[in-house]
Amino acid sequence: RSALRTLSALPAAGIVSALPRIARAAEFSYKYGNNLPLSHPLNIRAQEAADRIAKETKGRVEIKIFPNNQLGGDTDMLAQVRSGGIEFFTPSALVIATLVPVAAINAVGFAFNDYNQVWAAMDGKLGAHVRGAIAKSRLYAFEKMWDNGFRQTTSSKAPVTNAKDMDGLKIRVPVSPLSISMFKGLGAAPASLQFSEVYSALQTKIVDAQENPLPIIQVAKLFEVQKFCSLTNHIWDGYWFIANGRAWEALPDDLKTIVARAINDAGMQQREDIKKLNESVVGDLQAKGLTINRPVAGSFRAKLRESGFYGEWKGRFGPEAWALLEGAVGKLA
Ligand code: X2X
């Protein structure tokens, strides 16, 4: 009895440290949803970040990962992270642009030539501009964007060798006005579907083609339902690691620092993983039966100019964002 009285006189934190063996719930138990299989570097590095965060916060912050659209497709997860149903989400730039239109700016067709240009822009002024816009939607975007990759075109029908081969192509694109506009500009017949629907849509021939970076084509096993892979490199796409604004603000500053450092560091490592995968995965995909070809960008760019794609999107993004993009990649239109 007297021991109990002593204990109950202690402040709550004292009791917890006096009884270290009693399992306790984390003070901040947060859910993170994403759309990729567990084997993708995004999930591998996110799990490492979650483990590091649990350790460095001494269990005060716990992040549970729900990969592979377990919580619904991108549109559902975006709604959940806004409402607070989940605290973290990694939407592609194309997907978060349904809420924050300027976020699609990195996905303007054939804008970036290589990763040096990409990271200089996204870790620099262009990325800061987009993060500012995301913040206005009461979402916190971590500083370092994660890599999705340069998007490539796969088809069950025929290789894409130049812009003419896009004519009438029934191609799945993400739920993204920019993607729809771009593929229409190229003469294709694009249809928006969430990523969670892509494999079965290809399998049942609802669409003949899709476009995604090579690591996704591999981990989502799209080679099982596609024959040709054309390295069109038409869009560079990345993932914004975002948090619900209230959940982020609820963290004391010292925990914010630990969480941000772990997530940004993991993002930097994830970029390296994708870079390495890009080098090895072509061979793997060929071995799995995909026929690979490397078209040149010229005819696609010309077709997009002709169709007014760049002019239209310059207007939609506005002069400030467009100038930041052209500052990073050179004149586009
Ligand atoms: O939906 C896609 O194609 C994906 C997985 O690349 C995105 O998240 C945009």
Image (cartoon, grey):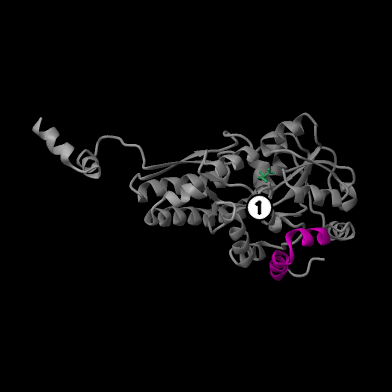
> With respect to residue 200, does 264 lie above or below?
below
- Quadrant (top left/top right/bottom left/bottom right) for the N terminus: top left
Q: In the picture, residue 318 is in which quadrant?
A: bottom right
**Residue visible at 68% across and 68% down?**
324
Horizontal side of 297 relative to 146 (left or right) equals right
User: Foreground residue, 286 or 64?
Assistant: 64
> With respect to residue 321, does 55 lie above or below?
above
Does the numbered disc 1 mark a residue whose Cβ is under 8 Å from ligand 1? no
Q: Please, what is the three-letter code of the amino acid marked with disc 1?
A: Val
How many other residues sit within 10 Å of disc 1, few (<14), some (14-19) or many (≥20)? some
Q: Position of residue 190 (x, y in %)?
A: 81, 43
Residue bearing the label numbered 1: 100
Residue 322 magenta-highlighted:
yes
Viewer can see residue 297: no
Quadrant in which ligand 1 is drawn = top right
Viewer can see residue 67: yes
In the image, which residues are magenta? 310-329
**Residue visible at 61% across and 53% down?**
147
Q: In the picture, residue 104 is in which quadrant?
A: bottom right
Q: Position of residue 120 (x, y in %)?
A: 62, 66
Horizontal side of 76 relative to 251 (left or right) equals right
> With respect to residue 284, does 132 lie above or below?
below
Query: In the displayed image of the protein, which residue is found farthest to the left?
Result: 2
**Residue visible at 54% across and 44% down?**
43
User: Foreground residue, 222 or 139?
Assistant: 139
Helix, strand or loop at mark 1: loop
Residue 3 magenta-highlighted:
no
Q: Position of residue 189 (x, y in %)?
A: 85, 42
Kindly report the secondary structure that dominates the magenta region of the rendered protein: helix
User: Foreground residue, 23 or 286?
Assistant: 23
User: Foreground residue, 125 or 237?
Assistant: 125
- Quadrant (top left/top right/bottom left/bottom right) for the C terminus: bottom right
